[in-house]
Image (spheres, rainbow, N blue to C red):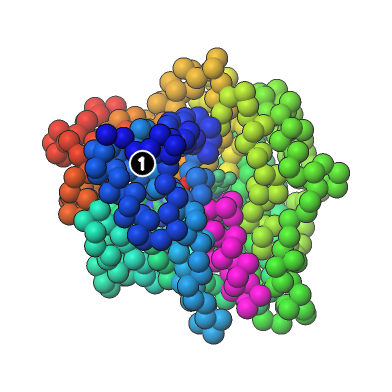
Amino acid sequence: MRPPASRLERVEAWGMSSASAAYVYRPTSIEGILEALKEAEECSIHAAFKGGGNSYGDAFQCAEGVVIDLSRMTRILSWDPATGVLECEPGVTIRAAWQHTLPDGWWPPVVSGTSFTTLGGALSANIHGKSSFHAGPIGEHVLEFDLLTVTRELLRCSPTENSDVFFAAIGGFGLLGAIVRIAIQMHKVHSGLLEVEAFRTRNWQSTFQVFENYEKMADYLVGWVDCFAGGRSAGRSLIHSARYLKPGEDAHPEESLRVSAQALPDTVMGWVARSRMHKLMRPFVRPLGMRLVNAMKYAMSRREHGTRVRQPLAKFNFLLDSAPNWKLAYQPGSLIQHQSFIPKNEAMTVFEKIISLSQGRGLVPFLGVLKRHRPDRFLLSHAVDGYSLALDYRKTRSNAEDLAALIRVLDDVVLESGGRFYLAKDSTLTPGSASRIWPQETVEKFVELKRRLDPSGLLQTEQSKRVFGDFARLSWDERPQVESP
Ligand SMILES: Cc1cc2nc3c(=O)[nH]c(=O)nc-3n(C[C@H](O)[C@H](O)[C@H](O)COP(=O)(O)OP(=O)(O)OC[C@H]3O[C@@H](n4cnc5c(N)ncnc54)[C@H](O)[C@@H]3O)c2cc1C
């Protein structure tokens, strides 16, 4: 037995590197989710949840299974401008959330580089922002959520109620149930503007020095790294540090807090329509073109160095949204990201090695983004007291094998240094990687919770099968074990 063929759709990874056919349901209520789960059970196929579909790899894919897309559960259930507590359904996007609360002086406590992420997807991945080094991941700002489990329980979870589930379902990638209601503490702001400072650095050493100098005073820190630079210039970067304005610093907060004051420009560079930007970018998204783009960006950063400007919160945080569909510039081909999280003492050596290995194999990442992080209490945490480097690689038919081989080598370098990966960006981890990323007792704890809340292992994604093994069939001992390098 199969669900109706009319529900069959192609579900593609955001980075376009994989796609699979699945029976897609788009419920607008808990009853609708229950119906979709029942359909999967009756057909003896797996099910997975999907938010806005912004995970780079297969975190929401369920080949030939049921994909339950929660992006239509978009109701804001309550908003209290006095306390800044927002209560909503999981399909509310970060964009819809800030548009609702900013005029009252509240901004999401943590945001991703795109505002199209849903809050359900944000919690399930436990997203981090450029503020990760002091604000932590989004989970730390969640007051409570309701989790609908395969066992048909509606569990209220908070740091004190069902806390084991709270700390595992946040960052649990939808494998323990559907997050159907969220209460989150927004962050008080006194202006819709940030004060942004730019620093141009010459090499890895000065890049890390700027991060160290500014992590105590900045609210946001992010570095763009020129991955084409080598030798003494390796690690040269343009770093932006930003801080919220204090009360009184913005003479007209009522203006900057308006949603219209946050609008991203309709054109890029004043003349290219945002929606057509990817077409203009396409000829450059090739090794030679990107070498040129990176070199030009670095050269032009000379003018920005040392400047201090005020920028709308949305413009600073969601720069990537200003060119929607920019990923299409990677076609023909797709985009995969390798984001590794490395303890601070090892970070410089490891990132230097990663870039030089990539350069040595002629597979230079087109974009490199450096962030600072701190550890958190979530079970499957991707954060460490250290740094992450997110690298965008173009995957094509002709380089696919070489790229896969490179990524395997990079993964070993990361894991040997006590590093971690972030499943929202992953599309390449090899089978059984979970036991190399997290301590065995952590994975066992997660598997135990999974058995309690989803005894039949109904909820599985292509990624979970790859990284953890098949929850339905395998006991821990039978899980694919990867030999240590
Ligand atoms: C351009 C771009 C920039 C990005 N920048 C950042 C960044 O700066 N920091 C960062 O941390 N991430 C970043 N991301 C990744 C993104 O924030 C995460 O992948 C996030 O999970 C996407 O949310 P989504 O709503 O699209 O969820 P999806 O990608 O659809 O799903 C993500 C996971 O959550 C599960 N899920 C979704 N909704 C629910 C629910 N209601 N209940 C249970 N499980 C659910 C899915 O099964 C899946 O495993 C970026 C992505 C893009 C495309």
- Asked whether, in this view, residue 178 is left or right of residue 308, the answer is left
- Residue 17 position, x and y percent, is 50, 29
Q: Residue at x 66, y 49 (%)?
A: 321
Name the residue beneath numbered marker 1. Answer: 66
- Asked whether, in this view, residue 49 is left or right of residue 239, the answer is left
Instruction: Quadrant for the C terminus, please.
Output: top left
Of residues 485 and 257, the one drawn nearer to the viewer in this rendering: 257
Vertical relation: 435 (above or below) 318: above
- Residue 27 position, x and y percent, is 42, 54
Amino acid type at mark 1: Val
> Does the image show residue 376?
no
Q: Does the residue labelled 1 lie within 8 Å of ligand 1?
A: no
- Which residues make up the magenta segment? 93-119
Of residues 163 and 433, the one drawn nearer to the viewer in this rendering: 163
Residue 160 drawn in magenta: no
Q: Determine the image quadrant of residue 413.
A: top left
Q: Residue at x 63, y 67 (%)?
A: 99
Q: Residue at x 61, y 48 (%)?
A: 223
Q: How crowded is mark 1: few (under 14 residues within 10 Å), some or many (20 or more)?
A: many
> Does the image show residue 34?
yes
Vertical relation: 233 (above or below) 357: below
Vertical relation: 9 (above or below) 303: above
Of residues 316 and 150, the one drawn nearer to the viewer in this rendering: 150
Residue placed furthest toward the bottom? 82
Residue at disc 1, secondary structure: strand
Of residues 41 and 345, the one drawn nearer to the viewer in this rendering: 41
